[in-house]
Image (cartoon, helix red, strand yellow):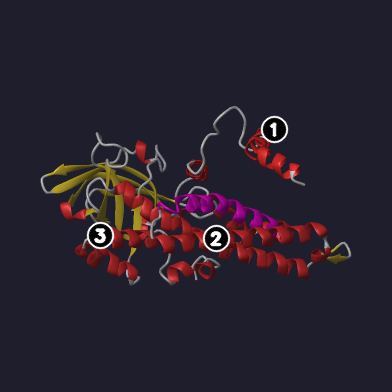
């Protein structure tokens, strides 16, 4: 379903599966109180309101160890101060989920908390809404927000004090796989356009479809997309089976690594096959080309996910004992002779 929805930039909004609302709904469903679910989750699922996930900061990006936005106890309330950057959808949101430092002395896994904050709470100042490349300024939807003495009640706390890191992993794990599903649909649409153009355009006495370079574009795109689709399906199956994002963390990170390259490569080939029309604003391909880098940054940069994949994978291995690698042929031959030599001699002697 998400693959089909991913073919259109508007479909996810129509069907209520757009980021960041799906991830926000998931963590409220997991960690919210009944009152929080009634206030925020039900209208969100009914498509009556939008939401915003306000996490990243101007100086720190997505690295929570560098966050400086704080929430400090004041009686029964919390007071939030700080800056958040690229808080997508804030201009249309009815509420924000704000990640803030609540205990500077605790380790990074226990020192931050999340708060559900209505957008009309005094002290929330949207400084500007930034557009993506190529978008008009008035269409910007990624906010720079200054939280200035924003007072919220104790029941605004989501999931308990110090629980932000665990909550964020729950949210981002699902968000990454949803992005991947939608990316498959968009990449498939670019491949469809490529094939249609190849069969429709005649150059140098023949169809583009007859040219080996174009055939290579089509074959590479099909093979890469088919592999990626199966990888995403397998990862989604594992999430459903284990109900534990942490257990599937390696594969989710690997999907996130592969996703921007798959999309960028296929869209670039489609642009090349369309020629000058491909880079114009009369086709959507030039706009889609930016989505690749966006997917390489959203929900954590590609480089961080590569590190996660490597670290998780290396835990499944161990160092070799001794001087030589475990597949060292002379060593294995000597071990085989030691283990089987007497049997071999006995077998030869009896024949």
Between disc 3 and disc 1, the foreground one is 1
3 or 2: tag closer to the N-terminus: 3
Magenta stretch contains residue 329: no
Q: Considering the whole magenta stretch, tell me its main secondary structure.
A: helix
- x, y percentage for residue 218? 72, 61
- x, y percentage for residue 234? 52, 61
Residue indicated by mark 2: 183
Q: Residue at x 82, y 59 (%)?
A: 212
Q: Residue at x 23, y 38 (%)?
A: 103
Q: Residue at x 79, y 56 (%)?
A: 213
State the residue in front, 33 or 140.
33
Q: Which residues are magenta?
A: 246-271
Q: Residue at x 47, y 52 (%)?
A: 131
3 or 1: tag closer to the N-terminus: 3
Looking at this view, name the residue that lies furthest to the left. Answer: 75
Quarter holding residue 348: top right
The image shows residue 350, relative to residue 65, as above or below, that is: below
- x, y percentage for residue 319? 53, 34
Residue indicated by mark 3: 32
Provide the secondary structure element on which disc 3 rests.
loop
1 or 2: tag closer to the N-terminus: 2
Mark 1: give few (<14), some (14-19) or many (20+) Cα within 10 Å. few
Residue indicated by mark 1: 330
């Amino acid at each position: 379903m998400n693959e089909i929805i991913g073919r259109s930039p508007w479909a996810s909004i129509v069907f209520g599966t757009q980021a960041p609302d799906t991830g926000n709904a998931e963590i409220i469903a997991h960690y919210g109180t009944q009152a929080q679910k009634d206030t925020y989750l039900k209208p969100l699922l009914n498509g009556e309101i939008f939401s915003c996930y306000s996490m990243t900061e101007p100086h720190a990006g997505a690295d929570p160890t560098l966050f400086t936005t704080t929430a400090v106890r004041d009686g029964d309330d919390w007071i939030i101060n700080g800056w958040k950057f690229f808080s997508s959808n804030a201009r249309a949101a009815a509420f924000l989920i704000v990640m803030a430092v609540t205990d500077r002395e605790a380790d990074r896994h226990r020192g931050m908390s999340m708060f559900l904050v209505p957008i009309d709470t005094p002290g929330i100042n949207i400084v500007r809404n930034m557009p993506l490349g190529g978008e008009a300024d008035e269409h910007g939807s990624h906010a720079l927000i200054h939280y200035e003495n924003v007072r919220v009640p104790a029941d605004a706390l989501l999931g308990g004090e110090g629980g932000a890191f665990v909550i964020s992993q729950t949210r981002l794990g699902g968000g990454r796989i949803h992005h991947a599903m939608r990316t498959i649909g968009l990449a498939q649409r670019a491949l469809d356009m490529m094939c249609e153009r190849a069969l429709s355009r005649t150059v140098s006495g023949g169809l583009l479809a007859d040219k080996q370079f174009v055939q290579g574009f089509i074959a590479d795109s099909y093979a890469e997309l088919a592999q990626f689709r199966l990888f995403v399906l397998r990862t989604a199956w594992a999430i459903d089976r284990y109900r534990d994002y942490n257990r599937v963390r390696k594969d989710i990170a690997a999907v996130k690594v592969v996703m921007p390259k798959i999309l960028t490569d296929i869209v670039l080939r489609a642009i090349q096959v369309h020629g000058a029309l491909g880079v114009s604003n009369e086709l959507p391909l030039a706009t889609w080309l930016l989505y690749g880098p966006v997917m390489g940054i959203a929900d954590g940069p590609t480089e961080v996910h590569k590190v996660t994949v490597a670290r998780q994978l290396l835990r499944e291995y161990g160092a070799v004992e001794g001087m030589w690698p475990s597949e060292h042929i002379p060593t294995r031959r000597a071990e085989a002779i030691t283990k089987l030599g007497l049997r071999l001699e006995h077998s030869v002697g009896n024949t």
